[in-house]
Image: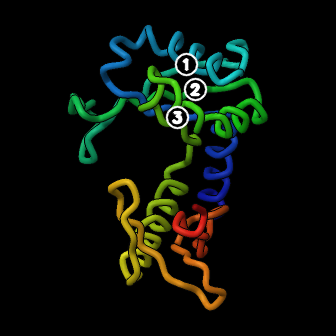
Amino acid sequence: MITTIATEFKRKEERENNLVLAVPRSTLTQSEDDAKFAKKLATNMGIPETKVKKVRRIKRRSEDSNTVLTTVQTHPVLVVVELESTEAKMEMLRKSRALRQIPEFKDVYVNEDLTPSERIANRKLREERDRKNNELSESVIINGRTFKFKTCPDGKKRFWGIRNGELKLVLSIVDRQ
């Protein structure tokens, strides 16, 4: 038990300055392009490319063996970017939403590099959020998307969302307009 906790802390510490980029396969053709792409992305986000220390591509493995899978063309390429500091990582995460406005990067997603146990916990949290949101009875269609919500006693419409690792009722887009 103590060994498991120590291993988890070590894994977390190793990943504290890392981000994972999910990049469309058509954007990155060869692994030599990964470092150039990561530095260009950082520069477009207003982060000096010198803050990018290392870049490596994650190879997908099959669950039942150690052989590397040939990935389906629709799966994004996963690239781990190690940054100089935690501050640079947090700044890049904060600014990642602005990538939607740049055509070259609109399909690139920036996420924290999580340990396997953190990924499992996040998946369970998302499943619980989705289950609770599916139980909500009220809905509205905005720009072709259906938003489900519930009206709370204060008259505001809310849905279940994840905030700081917890499930919470969040103010709906219906009330934000």
Give the secondary structure at mark 1: helix
Residue at 49% over, 31% down: 21
Can you name the residue that lies furthest to the front here?
A: 177
x and y percentages locating residue 11 in the rendered image: 61, 44
Residue 85, by quadrant, is: top right
Q: Give the amino acid type for the residue marked by disc 3 in the picture.
A: Val
Q: Do callouts 2 and 1 mark residues in contact (Cβ within 8 Å)?
A: yes
Residue at 63% over, 57% down: 3
Q: Do callouts 2 and 3 mark residues in contact (Cβ within 8 Å)?
A: yes
- Residue labelled with disc 1: 38
Q: Is tag 2's residue or tag 3's residue first in the polypeptide sequence? A: 3
x and y percentages locating residue 19 in the rendered image: 59, 34
- Residue labelled with disc 3: 20
Q: Is tag 2's residue or tag 1's residue first in the polypeptide sequence? A: 1
Query: Quadrant where the N terminus lies?
Result: bottom right
- Residue labelled with disc 2: 81
